[in-house]
Image (cartoon, rainbow, N blue to C red):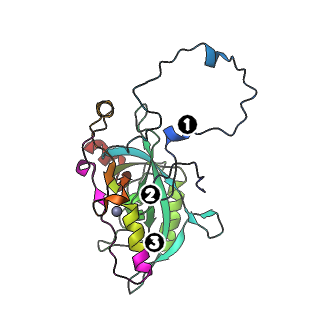
């Protein structure tokens, strides 16, 4: 999925939220519709003159949500996408594993956050790399989503090759299963990040910018009209290292997954 220049760059892979998509111009010709169509001329709408249609909505507040899991895949190196790719750890001993990318579409029927796409940290990357506890990101998700027959996709004691694990994961995402997600506002200064990358490339000492994590660490939103909409914190923060870098805007990242049963108990 190539991101068109006019699309909102949300998260690593880039996607417009549902509300933003609704407002994007349609490619379909509208010439066939009568200019005096009753949908246009018979219904009066009060437009909210206090609100600003150009204002970007704040990311959804840090919370637990029900969401649909979607496979984003990885670049195939030929301008297209494939389901997953091979990665290696940076440090010795190098370990090979499979990696893909996912997104989560919030389910909030009738609510403000319905259809908003959020990505897990690191651009939605998930893989078969196993941590000290013997868990991988994909086994964590597979244990928390259910097959159509109601059984979890991965039960305790399942022993597979990495190839079998990733194939099971890709298969499980075909039906866009539901899962609980925990989200967190995160921001780091892009200009600082670019400076660090340039210093690293040039062989100089460098430090990646710190990421501000957690909505409650952001400044209070002072605009009463936004407070009324439940927006209590301001996602825009100025760079702490160099004021010349200006403001960066928080993104909501997925920082944890829950089964729907765990989500019910937690909300
Ligand atoms: Zn900065």
**Residue of label 1:** 22
Label 2 crowding class (10 Å Cα cut-off): few <14, some 14-19, many 20+? some
206 part of magenta stretch:
yes
Q: Callout 3 environment at 10 Å: few (<14), some (14 to 19), or many (20+)?
A: few
Residue that label 3 marks: 160
Q: Earlier in the sequence, mark 1 or mark 3?
A: 1
In screen coordinates, is 68 left or right of 256? right
Q: Could you tell me which quadrant the N terminus lies in?
A: bottom right
- What's the residue at 68%, 40% (across, down)? 27
Q: Please state the quadrant of the image where ligand 1 appears.
A: bottom left
As drawn, the residue found furthest toward the front would be: 244
Secondary structure at badge 3 equals: loop
Q: Is residue 177 above or below residue 54?
A: below
Image quadrant in which you'd find residue 245: bottom left
User: Of 240 and 168, which appears nearest the observer?
Assistant: 240
Q: Which segment did they paint magenta?
A: 198-221
In this rendering, would 99 be left or right of 185?
right
Residue at the (50%, 70%) spot, across then down: 164
**Residue denoted by label 2:** 153
Ranked by sequence position, the earlier of labels 2 and 3 is 2
Q: State how far apart marks 1 and 3 are (Cα).
A: 43 Å
- Residue that sits furthest to the top in the current view: 42
Q: Residue 131 in the image: x percent, y percent?
A: 33, 73
Residue 107's quadrant in the figure? top left
Mark 2 C-beta closer than 8 Å to ligand 1: no
């Amino acid at each position: 999925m190539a991101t068109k220049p006019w699309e909102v760059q949300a998260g690593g892979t880039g996607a417009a939220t549902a509300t933003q998509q609704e407002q994007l111009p349609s490619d379909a010709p509208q010439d066939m519709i009568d200019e005096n169509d009753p949908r246009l001329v018979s219904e009066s709408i009060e437009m909210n003159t206090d609100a600003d249609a150009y204002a970007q909505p704040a990311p959804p507040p840090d919370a637990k949500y029900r969401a649909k899991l979607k496979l984003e895949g990885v670049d195939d190196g030929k301008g297209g996408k494939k389901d997953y790719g091979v990665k290696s750890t940076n440090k010795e001993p190098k370990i090979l594993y499979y990696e893909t990318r996912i997104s989560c579409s919030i389910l909030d029927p009738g609510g403000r956050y319905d259809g908003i796409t959020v990505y897990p940290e690191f651009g939605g990357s998930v893989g078969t790399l196993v941590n000290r506890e013997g868990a991988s990101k994909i086994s964590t998700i597979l244990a928390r989503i259910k097959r159509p027959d109601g059984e979890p996709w991965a039960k305790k004691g399942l022993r597979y090759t990495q190839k079998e694990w990733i194939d099971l994961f890709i298969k499980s995402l075909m039906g866009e299963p539901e899962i609980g997600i925990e989200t967190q506002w995160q921001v780091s200064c892009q200009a600082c990040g670019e400076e660090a990358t340039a210093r690293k490339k040039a062989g100089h000492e460098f430090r990646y910018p710190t990421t501000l994590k957690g909505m409650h660490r952001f400044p209070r939103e002072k605009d009463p009209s936004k407070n009324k909409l439940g927006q209590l914190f301001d996602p825009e923060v100025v760079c702490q290292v160099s004021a010349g870098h200006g403001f960066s805007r928080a993104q909501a990242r997925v920082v944890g997954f829950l089964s729907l049963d765990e989500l019910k108990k937690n909300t």
